[in-house]
Amino acid sequence: MRSPECEYWIAGAHKELCSLADMQVFVLIPCSDVPKGRWPLRGKLVCKRKQDNAGDIVCYKVCYIAKGYAQKYSIDYKKTTAPTARLESFQTILHIAAAHGWDIQQIDVKTAFLHGILPEDETAYLEQPQGFEEPGKDSWVMKLMKSIYRLKQAGRIWNQTFDDAVTGWGFQRMDSD
C-alpha cells in the first residue's frame, strides 16, 4: 500500500474480487453460519506486473489465493490427487497425428481452477481480503462454491469438472492414463 503504484494494485484487487463474484466462486455468509469445528482460511492478494515484449508494464494483475497450507485433512478436504496424462500418451497421439497429417491444437483454459465446483462435503470458507471487505458485511466470510487457487483439492476438483465436460462431448479417457 506504500508503493507509488498503490492505485493500480487497489484497482486490480477490486477487479479480481468482482471477477470472483461474477463467476459465482463464493457467497458471503455471516461467521455464525460457518459449521462448528470449521474455521475460515486466510487468503492473500498476490500482485504481479504483466509486461509486453519491450518490457513495458501493460497490466497490474492481482489474484486472490487461499492459504491452503492451513487446511486440515478430512475436515477441509478428502483427496488431493488428480490424474495427469502420461508423456507416452502425448507421444502416441502426436505420432498418430503426424502419420495421418492431422492438425494438433492446444488450449489454455483461463482461470481453470475457478471453474471447479466444490462438492458439499468439501466446502471451504475464506476470509475476505483485509481492506476489501464488502461494505456492511465486514465480518462476514466467503463460502466457496468453486475451488480457488492454492486450495489443496483445487487440482482434483478442476480435473473432475474438466473430465465431466469432455466425456459429455463424447471423448473417452485412454486406458493407459
Image (cartoon, rainbow, N blue to C red):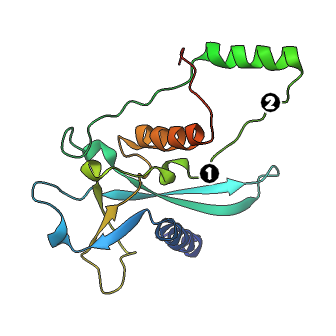
Question: For mark 1, does the 10 Å Cα neighbourhood hold few (<14), some (14 to 19), or many (20 or more) residues?
Answer: few
- Is residue 14 shown left or right of residue 8? left
Percent from the top left, x then y, of residue 33? Answer: 17, 69
Q: Earlier in the sequence, mark 1 or mark 2?
A: 2
Relative to 136, does residue 129 appear above or below in the rendering? above
Kindly identify the amino acid type of the residue bearing the numbered disc 1.
Lys
At 42% from the left and 37% from the top, the residue drawn is 156
Residue sitting at the far right: 101
Q: Nearer the viewer, mark 1 or mark 2?
A: 2
- Is residue 30 shown left or right of residue 149? left
Kindly identify the amino acid type of the residue bearing the numbered disc 2.
Ile
Question: For mark 2, does the 10 Å Cα neighbourhood hold few (<14), some (14 to 19), or many (20 or more) residues?
Answer: few
Percent from the top left, x then y, of residue 22? Answer: 51, 70
Residue at which label 2 appears: 104
Q: Nearer the viewer, residue 50 or 76?
A: 76
Percent from the top left, x then y, of residue 1? Answer: 46, 70
Q: Circle 2 — which element?
A: loop
Residue 77, visible in the rendered structure: yes
